[in-house]
Every structure is written in C-alpha cells, then in structure tokens.
Image: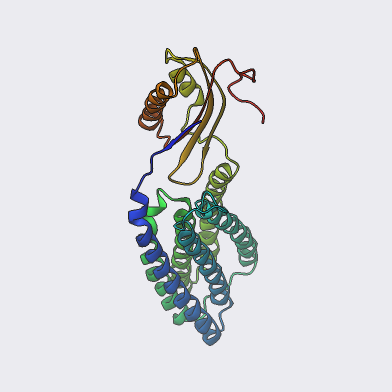
Amino acid sequence: MGHSHTHNHSHHDHGDLKGRNLFISIILNIIITVAQVIGGILSGSLSLLSDALHNFSDVISLIISYIANRLSKKEASLRRTFGYKRAEILAAFINAATLIIVAILLIFEVIERFKNPQEIESNLVIWLSLLGILANGFSVLLLKKEANTNMNMRSAYLHLFTDMMASVAVLIGGILMKYYQVYWVDSLLTLAIVLYLIWMGFDLLKASTKVLMLFTPEAIPVEDIIEELNSFDEIKNIHHVHVWQLNEDEIHFEAHIDFNKDIKLSEFDSILNEIEALLLTKFQINHVNIQPEFSKPDAKDVIVQD
C-alpha cells in the first residue's frame, strides 16, 4: 500500500500568533464582562447585566478556541495517531452551535423589548458600550485574517463581531433614547444583528459538521479525479474511493487501484509519485493512500459501502 503526504508548513508559522491573539481577546473580554457587571449594578441596568452574561459566554467560547488551538499542535502518538488535529474543527462546531442558541435566546429578549421598550438609564451604559466597541473591535481586527482560513478562528471571530455590533446597537439606542426618546431602535438593531448571527452561525455549523462527518469537501470533484487517474495507461480501474478533510490543512484521498499487469513495486512507486503530484497540484489533496491490486476479486465500484 502506497502512502504519502505533503504538509503545508505555513499553519505552523501562524500557530503561535493565533494563540496569542486569542489570549489577548480572552483578557479583553474578561475586562469588558467585569466592567459591565459593575456598571449594571451601579446603574441598575438589567440590559447591561444581560449583555455581561452574553460576554461571559463569549469568554467561554474563546477559551474553547484557545484550548483547541493549543491541542492541535500536540504531536501524534501510538494512542492518538492523528494527534489532536480535529480539535479546532470540534471547537468550531461547539462555538457555532452556541452562537445559534445565544441568537435564539436574544430573539425572545427582542420580542420582550418590543412589547416593553426599556430606556437606557445613564451615561455609564453609553460609556461602557463604547468600551465594548473598542475592546471587541480590537479583538475582531486581531482575528480577522485567520478567520478567513480557519473554522475555529472564524467561530471566535463571529462571537466577538456579534458582541461589537451589540455594543454599537446599545450605543446608538442609548443616544437616540437619551436625546430623541426613540425607544424601539435598540430592539430593531438587536434583531438585525441576531438574524445576521443565525445566518453566519448556521453556515459555520454546516461546514464544521461536514468535516466531522467525513463528507467529501465541496471543492473536490471526485468524478474528475477518477477520469484523470483512469487516463494512466497502467491503470485498469479506480475503485473504493474515499476523500475527506481531516482539518483546515489536510485533505486525504484513499483508493484501490487495479493495474493492467502485475507490475514491480518500483514501477508502482514511480506511478504513485505521478499520482501524488497530480492530486496535489490540480486538486490540493496533500495526503494520498493507494492500495495497488492486480485482478483482485473485490467490488470495482468507485464508491463502496464498507
């Protein structure tokens, strides 16, 4: 059985930076949460206390992301042959699920506020919303780049982005309530944020579920791969194909290949090198596992139910 993998080392270079940025975001969110609890008690504002609870849930989510980021760097072992490479995908799944739950709970709060609009009680609330915007805004900027390529970082980014937008809503609502007595705008802005949150959270939940379920990555056209490999003169048939994504950096391809003749092992190695180069350059598949066969009496379907 031929097996090869080509690692993308770039994620190692950014691993420490990701961890540092997450750690900074955790500290900032703890400061915001403590400030909101104190501010809520001093001003008697229930909305600030509920926002502090939301921020605390974000601290938990960020800690989950941070632990997953640390675990993903741990070496593989005899007991864990893949190491903890899936930790970040699992963290993204958990955080996306909690994101949607928080959003649904906020909808009930929005409905209640539409029925009974609450005036934001003091300047302290407005100043604390500014603190939330600045601290979460800084955290969002720290995580934005990695959020484009890493599900775990995207889940943390979405939690922080939502918090920042919620603080913007509180600020705008507070100013409009204070100077213009417009009481419904806070609820309307919160509803807009919640709908955006559900849309983004569901997309992330779906993407992380597909990886955890070992579904074929959407960007990988299995039929095209089969066609390309069948064009090799030495190959008679490609069957028993599995394609899956282990984490953000690794896509695996596994297949049985029936050869036209009983070739030498050295010949197989040469063909395997060509297959690996083709799959890497054309389909970005960096882990290849091929089982060579010659007239073996097994199922020859491309996809075989194990």
Picture coordinates of residue 293, whole percent (x, y): 54, 21
Out of 69 and 267, give the one closest to the viewer: 267
Picture coordinates of residue 29, whole percent (x, y): 46, 72
Apparent side of residue 279 relative to residue 212 in the rendered image (left or right): left
Image point (37%, 66%), residue name: 20
Picture coordinates of residue 41, whole percent (x, y): 55, 85
Apparent side of residue 200 relative to residue 16 in the rendered image (left or right): right
Count the labels in the image. 0
Which quarter of the figure has residue 22?
Answer: bottom left
Apparent side of residue 147 relative to residue 85 in the rendered image (left or right): left
Q: Coloring scheme of the render?
A: rainbow
Out of 38 and 249, give the one closest to the viewer: 249
Out of 261 and 116, give the one closest to the viewer: 261
Q: Quadrant of the C terminus?
A: top right
Image point (57%, 54%), residue name: 79
Which quarter of the figure has residue 234?
Answer: top left
211 vs 78: above or below: above
Image point (54%, 47%), residue name: 208
249 vs 181: above or below: above
Picture coordinates of residue 235, whole percent (x, y): 47, 16
Out of 251 and 240, give the one closest to the viewer: 240
